[in-house]
């Protein structure tokens, strides 16, 4: 007995100080393998106070020993003598206290994850049937307080029957990959206050989809990735191969997020609902990096309300369905203000539909519906708008902005449109629209109202039933604009001011029409093509009748003409005007091939009032009277007066001409004596008008003049006068008077001076 006691004491001492010998460790590992567990121990020793203690223990399923189920730094082994006598696994329980438990999960495409809990306390009871009961595993995982209990069954896989047609996945080949992804995401959580995680489970390793798990999580002030969460409360259950989210509520960024639903792993189906009142601009960039540049331009005064329903079921087919609603107030995107935005959406694979859309701005509202294909980037939508489109310019793509930017509206127009396009192909943008507006302008041309039917295809805008209202009259017709070719073709009829309306066709048209000023009543028609890149490609014609037409200092009571623009040249044909009591007829050509356009006038005057003509030229009342007739041909280049040349003839009848600056020296002698005739020919050159044969007859008095009148108003003439020049014989007696009455006329039209040529100025009148 003494020997046995000594041997027992020595054995206990050996086990305490040196641990189990190799054969005992192998025997114990062998017994565990028989029970279905692959185990490895760094050491096993006897602790006189705690019992048998193992360190660096690793446990795995015997069928997959290379995939550890748990790694524990230190644990207590509790043996059962009954099992030992019956040659069964002698370990009845494993107890851990203040330990570190590391549970690796099955690897996915990114490798394995590791569930590591510190300060762990638990008892694992090993059943005779190979099951494991976890009795209140507590610890700290990523700062989370754990409270886990459950049951793990290692039963044999169910027998395969002839009726079983569904393929069974191989053991340990992906059944718990969702746990790997979940653990990887849990590892990203950072906490300031330890949250609580309560976990209840019944796992059957041979039938993972038949397992049952219930998890409850509650915490405050967490950080997940870059997401800051004020509080979160989660209740999740896994049963019969499905994950059921009873509720998942989180408070973050000034709002709440709630998730409920079911994910059936076995059937690959899900039905999840989602609602949010938080700030999407703070959350979306954390998951969608490409959204950052867009959301950077977004300002939200009040968090939007979002609801969503995401499901995949036999009713939806092979493509999941996402439906929901969005309601938001007080938005500002790229400087554009929105009072509210509401819409319902439906997403079936690549196709997204929007219904019941209502967008309200300070100026009006847009209602409509549409759809967008994510894969092809095609879109189609219809809308009814009372929003000012110029306020939406920052949101528009290039060719749309090009159309809208020149517009201005006193009140928003009414637009009903169907729009389609492709976000990666601007030329695919197309629309059909009806538009009507009150007071507005386009390219600086003011309108009292406008309406039209628009059709855009491949960057070509066809405008039909165009009506532009102005106070002096309307413009009606059609316009076809090719934005890629920079061309505009038109067929118009106008009662409005033609010069002012020309700006609608572009700067070139406005430049061409600028010198012409139209009166209040116009009857005009025009058709043709304007090429903004190639002036030689521009060709148009017009017919105009106008009252009060003006050019330079002249005004016609009524005028009509035919205009033709081709080869960068403007022709004015068949010009016919009521001109100061007479008629003015002619034609003109303007060539724009050079920087300074060249021009040519060929016109005639018949019986026009000299007094009215001179008053218009001099901008003051004239006392010269008479009726003017004549013709002239003038050509020049731009504003260069040196290039101005011409010739012509004129005659004046029944006029009092002596008050004219040229003959002012004779005004006192002749008074109001009417000139029976006045005629001359003239040339224009060197910034002056020159004549060599001006002849004026007034009863017995005759005067002739030669010289020039400068464009600056300065005169340089020689004037001779003779009495009874037309009386034969007597004219020989009066001829010497021509030498006496020969004057040099100088000064200007406004301030002429006279000096006798052949006698001292003291003997004859002078100035």
Image (spheres, rainbow, N blue to C red):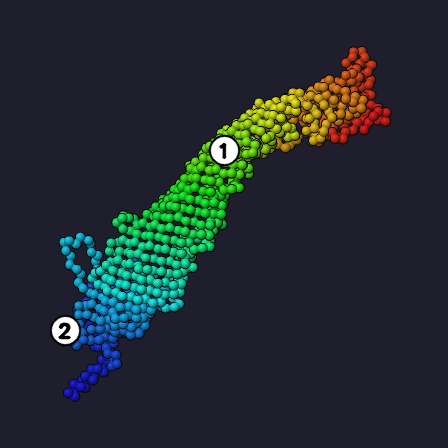
Where 291 falls versus 590 (above or below)?
Answer: below
Q: Which mark is residue 526?
A: none
Residue denoted by label 2: 87
Horizontal side of residue 696 vs 148, given as left or right: right
Q: Secondary structure at mark 1?
A: strand
Residue denoted by label 1: 467
Relative depth, front residue between 361 and 545: 361
Relative depth, front residue between 470 and 630: 470
Q: Crowding at label 2, few (<14), some or many (≥20) Cα neighbours within 10 Å?
A: few
Q: Is residue 627 visible?
A: yes
Answer with mark 2 or mark 1, whichever residue precedes in sequence. Answer: 2
Q: Position of residue 279 (x, y in %)?
A: 42, 56
**Residue occupying image coordinates x 21% and y 82%:** 12
Instruction: Name which quarter of the figure residue 711 lies in.
Output: top right
Q: Name the image quarter holding the N terminus.
A: bottom left
**Residue occupying image coordinates x 50% and y 36%:** 450
Distance (Cα) linking label 2 and label 1: 104 Å
* Of marks 2 and 1, the one in the foreground: 1
Q: Position of residue 152 (x, y in %)?
A: 22, 66
Q: Position of residue 420 (x, y in %)?
A: 40, 41
Pick out the residue farthest to the top.
Answer: 729
**Residue occupying image coordinates x 18% and y 86%:** 5
**Residue occupying image coordinates x 31% and y 70%:** 139
Q: Is residue 17 visible?
A: no
Horizontal side of residue 677 vs 301, given as left or right: right
Relative depth, front residue between 201 and 254: 254
Where 747 falls versus 165 (above or below)?
Answer: above
- Marks 2 and 1 close (CB-CB < 8 Å): no
Instruction: Name which quarter of the figure residue 182 lies in.
Output: bottom left
Horizontal side of residue 614 vs 440, given as left or right: right
Q: Position of residue 737 (x, y in %)?
A: 82, 18
Pick out the residue farthest to the bottom.
Answer: 2
């Amino acid at each position: 007995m003494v020997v046995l006691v000594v041997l027992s004491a020595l054995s206990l001492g050996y086990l305490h100080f040196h641990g189990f010998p190799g054969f005992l460790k192998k025997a114990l590992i062998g017994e565990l393998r028989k029970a279905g567990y692959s185990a490895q121990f760094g050491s096993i020793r006897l602790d006189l106070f705690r019992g048998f203690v193992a360190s660096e223990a690793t446990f795995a399923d015997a069928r997959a020993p290379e995939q550890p189920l748990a790694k524990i730094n230190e644990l207590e082994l509790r043996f059962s003598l009954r099992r030992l006598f019956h040659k069964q696994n002698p370990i009845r329980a494993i107890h851990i206290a203040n330990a570190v438990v590391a549970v690796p999960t099955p690897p996915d495409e990114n490798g394995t994850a590791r569930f590591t809990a510190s300060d762990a306390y638990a008892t694992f009871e090993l059943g005779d049937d190979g099951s494991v009961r976890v009795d209140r595993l507590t610890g700290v995982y990523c700062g989370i307080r754990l409270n886990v209990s459950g049951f793990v069954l290692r039963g044999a896989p169910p027998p395969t029957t002839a009726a079983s047609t569904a393929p069974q996945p191989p053991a340990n080949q992906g059944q718990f990959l969702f746990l790997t992804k979940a653990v990887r995401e849990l590892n990203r959580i950072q906490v300031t206050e330890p949250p609580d995680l309560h976990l209840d489970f019944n796992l059957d390793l041979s039938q993972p989809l038949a397992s049952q798990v219930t998890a409850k999580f509650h915490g405050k002030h967490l950080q997940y990735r870059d997401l800051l969460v004020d509080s979160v409360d989660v209740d999740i259950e896994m049963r019969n191969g499905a994950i059921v989210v009873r509720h998942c509520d989180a408070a973050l960024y000034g709002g709440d997020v709630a998730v409920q639903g079911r994910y059936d792993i076995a059937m690959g189906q899900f039905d999840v609902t989602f609602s949010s009142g938080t700030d999407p601009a703070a959350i979306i960039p954390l998951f969608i990096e490409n959204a950052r540049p867009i959301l950077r331009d977004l300002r939200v005064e009040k968090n939007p309300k979002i609801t969503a329903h995401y499901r995949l079921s036999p009713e939806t087919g092979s493509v999941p369905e996402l439906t929901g609603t969005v309601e938001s107030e007080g938005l500002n995107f790229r400087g554009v203000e929105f009072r509210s935005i509401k819409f319902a959406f439906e997403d079936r694979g690549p196709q997204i539909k929007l219904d019941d859309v209502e967008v309200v701005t300070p100026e009006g509202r847009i209602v409509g519906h549409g759809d967008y294909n994510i894969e092809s980037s095609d879109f189609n939508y219809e809308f009814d708008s009372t929003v000012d489109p110029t306020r939406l310019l920052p949101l528009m793509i290039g060719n749309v902005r090009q159309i809208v930017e020149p517009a201005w509206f006193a009140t928003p127009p009414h637009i009903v449109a169907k729009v389609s396009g492709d976000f990666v192909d601007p030329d695919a943008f197309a629309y059909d629209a009806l538009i009507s507006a009150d007071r507005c302008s386009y390219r600086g041309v003011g309108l009292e109202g406008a309406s039209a039917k628009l059709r855009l295809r491949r960057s070509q805008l066809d405008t039909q039933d165009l009506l532009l209202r102005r106070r002096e009259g309307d413009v009606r017709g059609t316009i076809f604009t090719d934005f890629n070719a920079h061309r505009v073709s038109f067929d118009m009829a106008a009662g409005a001011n033609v010069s002012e309306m020309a700006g609608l066709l572009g700067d070139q048209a406005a430049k061409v029409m600028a010198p012409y000023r139209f009166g209040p009543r116009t009857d005009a028609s025009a058709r043709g093509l304007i090429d903004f890149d190639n002036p030689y490609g521009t060709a148009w014609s017009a017919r105009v009748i106008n009252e009060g037409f003006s050019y330079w200092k002249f005004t016609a009571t009524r005028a009509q003409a035919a205009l033709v623009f081709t080869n960068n040249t403007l022709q004015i044909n068949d010009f016919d005007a009521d001109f100061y009591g007479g008629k003015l007829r002619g034609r003109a050509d303007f060539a724009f091939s050079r920087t300074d356009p060249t021009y040519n006038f060929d016109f005639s005057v018949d019986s026009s009032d000299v007094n009215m003509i001179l008053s218009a030229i001099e901008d003051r009342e004239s006392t010269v009277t008479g009726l003017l007739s004549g013709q002239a041909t003038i050509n020049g280049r731009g504003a260069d007066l040196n290039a101005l040349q011409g010739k012509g003839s004129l005659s004046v009848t029944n006029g009092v001409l002596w008050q004219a600056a040229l003959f002012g020296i004779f005004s006192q002698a002749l008074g109001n004596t009417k000139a029976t005739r006045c005629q001359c020919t003239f040339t224009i050159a060197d910034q002056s008008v020159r004549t060599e044969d001006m002849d004026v007859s007034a009863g017995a008095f005759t005067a002739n003049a030669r010289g020039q009148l400068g464009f600056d108003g300065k005169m340089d003439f020689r004037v001779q006068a003779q009495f009874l020049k037309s009386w034969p014989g007597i004219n020989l007696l009066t001829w010497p008077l021509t030498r006496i009455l020969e004057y040099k006329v100088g000064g200007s039209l406004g301030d002429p001076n006279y000096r006798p040529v052949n006698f001292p100025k003291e003997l004859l009148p002078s100035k």
